[in-house]
Each structure stands twice: as structure tokens, then as C-alpha cells.
Image (tube, rainbow, N blue to C red):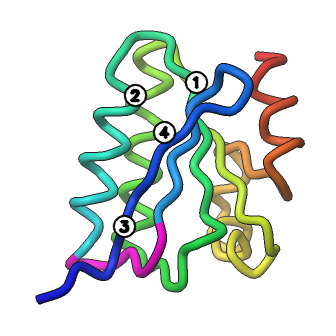
Amino acid sequence: MKTRLHISSRREGGIGVLAPEGEIDAVTRSILAAALSEALAAPGTRLILDLSGVTFLDSGGLGTISDQHRAARENGGMLSVYGGDPRRTRVLWLTGMADWLPVHPDLTTALAAIRER
């Protein structure tokens, strides 16, 4: 079976960016959880999750993002999200996650905000 989720990572101005591409659902959310957990392992890590390549995000994926955000905060770090297209992050606003999870319209805004904290 072909994996429906690929995750790449890069650094932008000294900040880590994790970029999943494909579907985040019950089958693939463990892949995202492992990648986020590894990227956020060091205390104080600041990370941006780039959802611009995500084609589907279910409630399990939202739970994974929520869990990793909480773990990052407990470890003195931060997880922020951007999606490029507002349709990618709309579910974060509709579910109320954007009330406590930093959600940004683009990478430039996300980088500026995460540097301020």
C-alpha cells in the first residue's frame, strides 16, 4: 500500500518547518505524530507546521496537532501553523483550535510571530 502522506522538513531563518503533503487521517496521523514528536523533542523548540500540501485533515489529525502543540508548550517550545490557502486552515478556526493554536496566513507571518515569542 502506498503511503498517502509524505513529510519533509527544512529550516527557514533558523526556525524548523515541517511540511506534510497528502492526507492526514486515521491511517496516516501516526506518521505526522512521529515527525512532530521528533522535531519538537529538544526543549524550547519552535516549529512551524506547513499545511499547504495537505489535501485532507480529519479529527484524528486535529487531535495529533493539538497533542503536539500541548507537548511543545510543556517542553518550553512552540508549534505554529500556516496553510497558504485559508481553506487549509479553516477547520482550525471552525473547531476553535485557532483560539489557542497560533495559525497564520503565510510563512512570512508565521516566522515573524514565532520569532517574537
Q: Is residue 22 magenta?
A: yes
Q: Element under label 2?
A: loop
Q: Give the residues drawn in magenta, as a range.
A: 21-27
Q: Amino acid at mark 2?
A: Leu
Picture coordinates of residue 40, whole percent (x, y):
40, 28
Q: Is residue 93 left or right of residue 33?
A: right
Q: Which residue is mark 1?
A: 46
Q: Callout 2 environment at 10 Å: few (<14), some (14 to 19), or many (20+)?
A: many
Q: Is residue 34 left or right of residue 112?
A: left
- Separation of marks 4 and 1 at Cα, in angstroms: 10 Å
Q: Amino acid at mark 1?
A: Arg
- Of 90 and 110, which appears nearest the observer? 110
Image quarter for residue 113?
Answer: top right
Q: Element under label 4?
A: helix
Q: Callout 4 environment at 10 Å: few (<14), some (14 to 19), or many (20+)?
A: many
- Contact, CB < 8 Å: mark 3 with mark 4? no
Q: Is residue 100 above or below residue 71?
A: below
- Contact, CB < 8 Å: mark 3 with mark 2? no
Q: Which residue is mark 4?
A: 69
- Separation of marks 4 and 2 at Cα, in angstroms: 9 Å
Q: Is residue 12 left or right of residue 54?
A: right
| Mark 4 / mark 1, whichever is N-terminal | 1
Q: Which residue is mark 3?
A: 6
Picture coordinates of residue 80, whole percent (x, y):
65, 41
Task: Work out which quarter of the rendered image holds the C terminus and state it.
Answer: top right
Q: Amino acid at mark 3?
A: His
* In this rendering, the label closer to the viewer, 4 or 2: 2
| Mark 4 / mark 2, whichever is N-terminal | 2
- Separation of marks 1 and 2 at Cα, in angstroms: 7 Å
**Residue shown at the point (65%, 75%) measured from the top left:** 91
Q: Which residue is mark 2?
A: 40
